[in-house]
Amino acid sequence: MSLFDEPDGAVTPGGRRPRRAETRSSAGAKIAGLAATATVAGVVAAGLALPAVGGTGVMIMGASDGLDLRPAVLAEPPLAEKTTVLDARGRRIAQFWDVYREVVPLSQVSDVMKTAIVSIEDYRFYEHGAIDVAGTVRALARNLQAGGVSQGGSSITQQYVKQVLLNTAVTREGKEEALRASYPRKLNELRYAMGIEQKYTKDQILEKYLNIAYFGAGANGIEAAARRFFGVRASRLDLSQAATLAGAVQLPTATDPQGGKENRRRLLERRDVVLDRMAELGEITPRQAAEAKSRKLGYRGTPLPGNCEASPYPYFCVYVREEFLRDPAFGRTAEERARLLYRGGLTIRTTLDPRMQAATEQAVGRHVHASDEPVAAEALVQPGTGMIRAMAASREYGTSARRNEMSYNIVADNDHGGIGGFQAGSTFKTFTLITALKKGMRIDDGFTVGNGYRASGYADFKNCEGGNIGDPTHTVTNDEGTPGFKSLQTGTWQSVNTFFMELERRVGLCDTVQTARSLGIKRADNRKLQEYETFTLGINEMDPVTVASAYAAIGARGRYCAPMAVTRVTDRDGGVTGHRPKCRQVLDPEIADATAHILSGVFTKGTMRAVGGIGRDAAGKTGTNDDQASAWFAGFTPDLAGAVSIGDPRGAIAHKLNGVTIGGRYYGAVFGATIPGPIWKDTMVAALRGVKATPFTPIDRARFGG
């Protein structure tokens, strides 16, 4: 097939079958044809005009001078394209891009758009080969008269080549070279265009051109332009809209409607030029042109949703983004991973459940207002998989100080956009409880404690390096509970500090730390866990995702699963990278059952008794820090786990939760059961509505009872 031929069966965008271009036997013959025609403009036969070296005017290079007129292969890297993030049900929740583009097939572009762009840019597109001979001769004649390159004669194929070269240039010099008006560049474009015409059909070339072209207003490609300019898909563009976009391609900066009234005036003029041209070519009637020209521009400036600030679930979005950027499966370096995320056209399927997310947001918002200084945060995790089902906070995510937004991910750790977290308080007593059960204690085993606890010596507590870190100068007192005999059950239900200090001493600080680590516990700020005697009182700063995942392991009968946000990544070619839960058995299932048994009593006989349960098997633990610097609740069922924190991001120690108004209500002091516990309860009731209740496995009383 000749470069000037059109594939059998091809038709023009207007529906007419294109006229056959003359057939030539070789690329050189085609150029010879151009040269012969160019004689009319005063050009020597069989030659091309090139800038003179060291003087004015032009020189003539003949075919005999070794000019390479053979088709060349153009490297066509995939276009930079947005990445789409989906929730667990397949609904879009976020997009990542640094070049906003959505590649679409030509069948998803309206016929009138195809006609408009061909009419104004290259009306003989379906008739000529790599170049428009008549247009190029006309431009060449004017260039000769001007003594340089003053007018282009580019076909749509040549324009596509130029856009590919521009998009693949990585330096400013490379981009300038791709745009430089020179005969050598034109010659290279021609050779590449000849190769493109050999490789693709006309429709395929037009599709590629429409997807790569820049239309202004940050919109790359026809689909992005249709959405940006008019809020419609490319397949729904009407005559006036199509003419507007076709007119924008030539001068996308000067006609960028975001640039003000003068730019919009120029864009209207360009639209009308396109409409007149379409009427002149008989693609539309003069009446249709007049009607379209009578319409206003209609530019809507539809926001191009991108990055996490535009996501309805920004905290989860940030978690997904950071998880991807840290995963070596998507590139050896951080730069490679970022390029793939922002330009790779991926589809990322995630674990977020929109119904559970809504339940979380509503519960948090019911108890803590966005305007409050303290911020509540909650994460939901599925036991047995580690899938993060929801992440929410009482304050919106963003960078606006005026709107009192959060500029970091308060629901997650530093690796996922956070900056530190809050001390987890008595939620850490659970790890001491588990360690006691691992060492053979029964649920009613215990000892007598008072209102104060002080280590008898430095050797009472040893960290995991063997160091003596007991502090005989510091006295721990009780915020809740009464002195007397406390068992594993009653000491946990009443959250008695002095009981857990002595329990930790008996079972070992290091063993307690190792239990916590086995359940995925690590500091939110990535620093080493602080191994002091008050470890059991929750002195380490944590984030809700990490704490919820640890408690989810108890609900899964001792099977810990790392937090998981992504289930599948599909590349632009349909290749799929699947993600499976990363789980391991870290607790004896019967020890997990015994832990759940004791923690379930927190709702009926302990610190949550005033709040109450959720109508199904559930277990959990409140957490409050010294002088109410922050407060927590972490709990679980076999089907879902969650953790809620509340603290003041201005500084929890300096801004304690005493004498504060939160959610429109005054609190003299905030404890774990005051706000976090009710948030957790409201969330769970709504999130698990319609989910069949799974009961806890009963405790082995022969092993742990008595």
Image: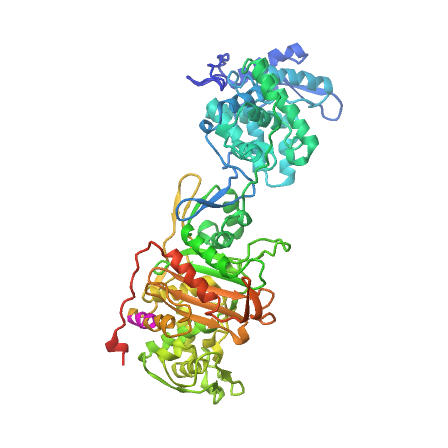
Image side of residue 34 versus residue 698, left or right: right
Residue furthest right as drawn: 55
Residue furthest bottom as drawn: 456
User: In terms of image quadrants, where is residue 381?
Assistant: bottom left
Residue 305 in sight: yes
Q: Find residue 447 and report its horizontal and vertical position in percent.
A: 37, 86
Query: In the image shown, does 159 or 686 lie closer to the viewer?
Result: 686
Q: Find residue 507 and report its horizontal and vertical position in percent.
A: 38, 81
Say if 67 sits above or below 417 in the image.
above
Image point (36%, 55%), residue name: 689
Residue furthest left as drawn: 702
Q: Is residue 84 magenta?
A: no
Residue 521 in sight: no
Image point (27%, 72%), residue name: 699
Quarter of the image where the N terminus is located: top left
Query: In the image shown, does 34 or 382 lie closer to the viewer?
Result: 382
Q: Find residue 228 and report its horizontal and vertical position in percent.
A: 56, 35
Quarter of the image where the C terminus is located: bottom left
Query: In the image shown, does 341 or 412 lie closer to the viewer?
Result: 412
Residue range corresponding to the magenta coloring? 590-596
Residue furthest top as drawn: 40
Q: How is the image coloured?
A: rainbow
Query: In the image shown, does 663 or 413 lie closer to the viewer?
Result: 663
Image side of residue 134 versus residue 265, left or right: left
Our reading of the magenta stretch's main secondary structure is helix
Say if 664 sits above or below 464 in the image.
above
Say if 277 sits above or below 568 in the image.
above
Q: Find residue 254 and report its horizontal and vertical position in percent.
A: 67, 31
